[in-house]
Image (tube, grey):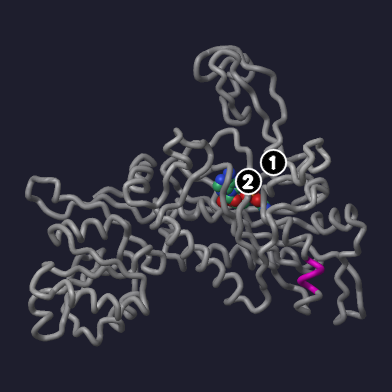
Amino acid sequence: MSDTVTMDQIVSLCKRRGFVFQSSEIYGGQAGAWDYGPNGIELKNRIAQFWWKEMTQLHDNIVGLDAAILMHPRVWEASGHVENFTDPLVDCKKCKTRFRADQIPEENLKTKTCPECGGELTDVRKFNLMFKTNIGPVEDGSGLIYLRPETAQGIYVNFKNVLQSNRMKLPFGIAQIGKAFRNEIVTKNFIFRSCEFEQMEMQFFVKPGTDEEWFEYWREQRWNYYKKMGIRMDKLRWHRHGPEELAFYAKDAYDIEYEFPMGFKELEGVHNRTNYDLTRHQQFSGKDLQYIDQDNGNERYLPWVIETSAGLTRELLMVLCDAYEEQKVADKGNEDDYRTVLHFNPIFAPVTVAVLPLMKKDGLAELAQDIRSELKEDFVTDYDQSGAIGRRYRRQDEIGTPYCVTIDYQSKEDHTVTLRDRDSMEQIRVPRDKLSLAIREKMKSYKRV
Ligand code: GAP
């Protein structure tokens, strides 16, 4: 058994089993962009649904939003992105490689030498990460518009709309899942850092002075979220932003980091953003964004914001890395001794139940199809009748299917089937009419071994 996984193993599995493909692959690929295949989109949707339920359904005071990607350009002036959303950049004059100045050894910066080829580096310059495009028919710059680099601003500009339309009272939150775009200079490590990605953000508006207690509350909530997902908690840690890292407007900030194959890296941020965002949007829009506190003599103030900001596509990578295992399961001296298995929590698995007739003939395939139709109502199912049964189990293990139902000759006689558990590979016989219930119970009591 191997506990460590390499990014190459993940990339290879993702392509082989339809989780993630390179964007525009037949044209040589588009850097910084990825396509989610049949299994990838199922996995991504399940993570998004889990987050959404956790943040909205399980919190009485959080509502959802789906703001447009294209926003008024003044939004990004108010937010500070036009001025400050930059990376320091250097180019090699010889090999033309572009680097983030803060990610190459200090010595190379000092001596202006390329870490790849030893060529001369340019001076450091600021590079804005926002993608610019043009809206409307004229391309004279008057239709300048940005692709949003974060979903958070869509929440701030709708603060008053949500407050009034849903008669919200502080403290309350607005949650949103959506695409964000950043012209990242370095996009290595697969989908970890891409130019087009998805975020799951929640902005929690609180009364000034109560921010510290809500900040701690949200740190605890977000930590417990990963526990509930079933992630190996020894792979997670907190990283507090030091003075040089902390955004100038933030009072405090922590990242939750996961130990990816390339080391501990940021997964999500929990930020105390003060009242910076609403103050700026009030200034730039000229609209009064204050909250009127009817429970406190109609006191008016701008709420403070505690933000939880996670990457959906980055969480998907974490779930894959966390679940991946190459396991020795036999000792016959051939390739069948090993299996690749994704130990997904069943609630995230792209397929929950695979239905496999032992043989195609003798009515087993028809019976299996019939059983699949029954299971379809309750679970995402797959059906596979081709190849040796052992190979079919391996294929399901590789995409993390937690349960396989096998229909054999005995099934025809006594209306029972076998139910195979992905992790233990144990099989039990279950009456057909108790199958749904048995799967449901297994899902409920699932624990990663
Ligand atoms: N509103 C705050 C904000 O956007 P951030 O730390 O820049 O904060 C939040 O981004 C999360 O979004 C990160 O923790 C990460 O999970 C995800 N993220 C950011 N840039 C990304 C990229 N280029 N590719 C994939 N995910 C990214």
Label 2 neighbour load within 10 Å: few <14, some 14-19, many 20+: many
Q: Is mark 2 within 8 Å of ligand 1?
A: no
Q: CA distance from mark 2 to mark 1?
A: 7 Å
Q: Residue at x 17, y 59 (%)?
A: 386
Instruction: Give the residue number, with chain letter if any, for mark 2.
Output: 181
Please state the extent of the stretch shown in magenta in the rendering.
Answer: 159-163
Residue placed at 47% from the left, 48% from the top? Answer: 35
Q: Judge whether 4 appears above or below 304 on screen.
A: above
Q: Secondary structure at mark 1?
A: loop
Q: Which residue is mark 1?
A: 130
Q: Is residue 241 above or below residue 406?
A: above
Residue 295 in percent (x, y) is at 85, 82
Of the residues under marks 2 and 1, which one precedes in the sequence? 1
- The number of callouts visible is 2
Q: Are marks 2 and 1 in contact (CB under 8 Å)?
A: yes
Disc 2 residue type (three-letter): Phe
Give the prevailing secondary structure in the magenta stretch. Answer: helix
Q: Which of the image's four quarters has the C terminus?
A: bottom left
Question: 211 or 180, which is in the foreground?
Answer: 180
Horizontally, residue 301 falls left or right of residue 379, namely right
**388, 418: nearer the viewer:** 388
Compared with residue 227, is residue 417 higher up or lower down, i.e. above or below?
Answer: below
Residue 341 on the magenta segment: no
| Label number found at residue 173 | none
Q: On screen, 368 above or below 120?
A: below
